[in-house]
Image (cartoon, rainbow, N blue to C red):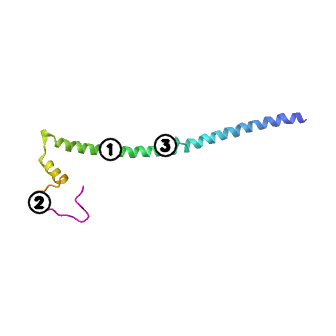
Amino acid sequence: MLARLRPSSWRFRRPHWLIVVGLSLAAYFSYHAVNGSRGLFAWREVSAELEASQRELDRLRAERRTVEQKVMRLRHDSLDPDLIDELARKELSFVEPLDVIILLDGQDGSK
């Protein structure tokens, strides 16, 4: 009778082990699919960082276009006298003899 109980009880315990191991593996991989270094939360952070980088790239491209237009206006074949005058006044602090300079509080005249 004792020999009969052992194999039957062993048969019922064995599938429980497989179920426990299977559920443990499923829980482990599910956790890392959400919270892991390449999981859903990390994907959200990378997506937000990508959007911020894209906005900065757009801003820098617009700034580059502005600078390219300014440089084009300074080329020898198409000099713009107003731009040269503006740059001389701003960068070199040149003024005309009849210019009136008004200093505002909180501004020291630097860029």
Is residue 105 covered in magenta?
yes
Q: What secondary structure do most residues of the magenta stretch adopt?
A: loop
- Comparing 6 with 88, the one in front is 88
Disc nearer the start of the sequence (2/3): 3
Q: Residue at x 73, y 38 (%)?
A: 17
Q: Residue at x 14, y 55 (%)?
A: 94
Q: Is residue 90 above or below residue 15?
A: below
- The quarter of the displayed image where residue 104 is located: bottom left
Is residue 13 covered in magenta?
no
Disc 1: which residue: 58
Q: Amino acid under label 3? A: Trp
Secondary element type, mark 3:
helix
Q: Residue furthest right?
A: 1
Disc 3: which residue: 43
Q: Quadrant of the N terminus?
A: top right
Disc nearer the start of the sequence (1/3): 3
Q: Residue furthest bottom?
A: 105
Badge 1 local density, few (<14 within 10 Å), some, or many (20+)? few
